[in-house]
Amino acid sequence: MAGVGESTIVSNATNLAKFMKLDQKGKVLAEYIWIDGSNGLRNKTKTLSEAPKSVDDLPEWNFDGSSTGQAPGDNSDVYIRPVAMYPDPIRLGENVLVMCETWDPDGTPNKFNYRHEAARLMEANAKHKVWFGLEQEYTLLAADGWPYGWPKGGFPGPQGPYYCGVGTGRVYCRDIVEAHHKACMYAGINISGTNAEVMPAQWEYQVGPCEGIDLGDQLWVSRWLLHRIAEEFGAKVSFQPKPIPGDWNGAGLHTNVSSKEMREEGGMKFIEEAMKKLEKRHVEHIKVYGEDNHLRMTGAHETSSIDKFTWGVADRGSSVRIPRACAREGKGYFEDRRPASNADPYQVTGMIVETLYGSLPEEKFN
């Protein structure tokens, strides 16, 4: 029990519940979510007079960009424009979660608004009907920053029994994972699965397939939900690609890609052409595939070397893996295993579409 003047780390669910049931008198709470200047998430709540029927009914809002690393103090207003809306699994009812883009007062995208160009790329290449499926790995940490379930100041047994494991001593914080899975489903996030990962206290969930820009929107909202739910349990979520140095697996954002041409008969031809294009721009891709990715991509622990591009069938040690079933059928998809767990999905998917189908002309703003 917390003492006088103290607060608990976790939410007091029993006390909160009675307030969450209060009548909102016809009004709706909209949780505006955006990406800050350090690739993190921010949010604030707006009261609406009525339930929005679509994202077009949601008003533009603003925030102090000097407090989020997105604007100087003497010109700190940054505007948030709603781009996607989801049912709120935290507050329930008609309340909503709102994914936003960030814009500067002069009418141009904020320099950390990577969604804008990615959306233009997706729209320009819509005829290819590019599907994405992202595998988000993450690590759950206790309040002291050490992975949940690990001995304080020590290490658990070697990797082996933890991947897709079950039972005490093999998996940790399944309650957070289960809660997140159900919350994503309620919100309409196309979460397609989840599993315990190779390192203990590390998990993965998959979002997709989604077409075009929808994948980036859904993955960012799913990350917000993971942070928000872990907050209830007093846990920290780490998207660091190598949270623990040494003989432990890192965390990635493996990106599955399939175009209309790749899914049709003879699609392997287009997959192989994609490999050639990806190889030519390997350096450019690595630049946007996540911070500290070099700590993870060492050529060990199911990764390729960050310095060279490789691809192969069923090879989890290559930069890009072609699933064996796709090679056998001669069509399907490929898995880019290079992105780190902290990579921005807008940048990753936008870069892939740009590499496969070409860049856009420079955009002019009034």
Image (tube, helix red, strand yellow):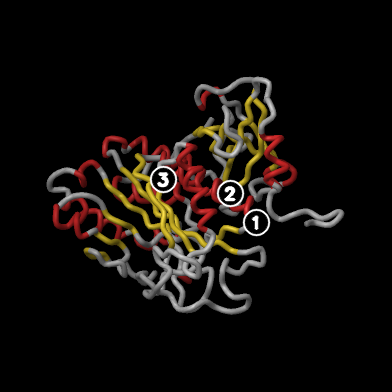
Q: What element carries label 1?
A: loop
Residue furthest right as drawn: 4
The amino acid pointed to by label 2 is Ile
Can you identify the residue that label 2 sits on?
229
Label 3 to label 2: alpha-carbon separation: 16 Å
Q: Residue 140: x and y, percent? A: 55, 61
Left or right of 58 on screen, residue 256 = left
The amino acid pointed to by label 1 is Gly
Can you identify the residue that label 1 sits on?
234
Label 1 to label 2: alpha-carbon separation: 9 Å
- Quick one: label 1 or label 2, which is nearer the N terminus? 2
The label shown at residue 170 is none
The label shown at residue 191 is 3
- Quick one: label 3 or label 2, which is nearer the N terminus? 3
Quadrant in the picture for residue 213: top left
Crowding at dot 3, Cα within 10 Å, few <14 / some 14-19 / many 20+, comes out as many
Q: Residue 118: x and y, percent? A: 42, 42
Q: Is residue 350 in view?
A: no
User: Where is the N terminus found, in terms of image quarters?
Assistant: bottom right
Q: What element carries label 3?
A: strand
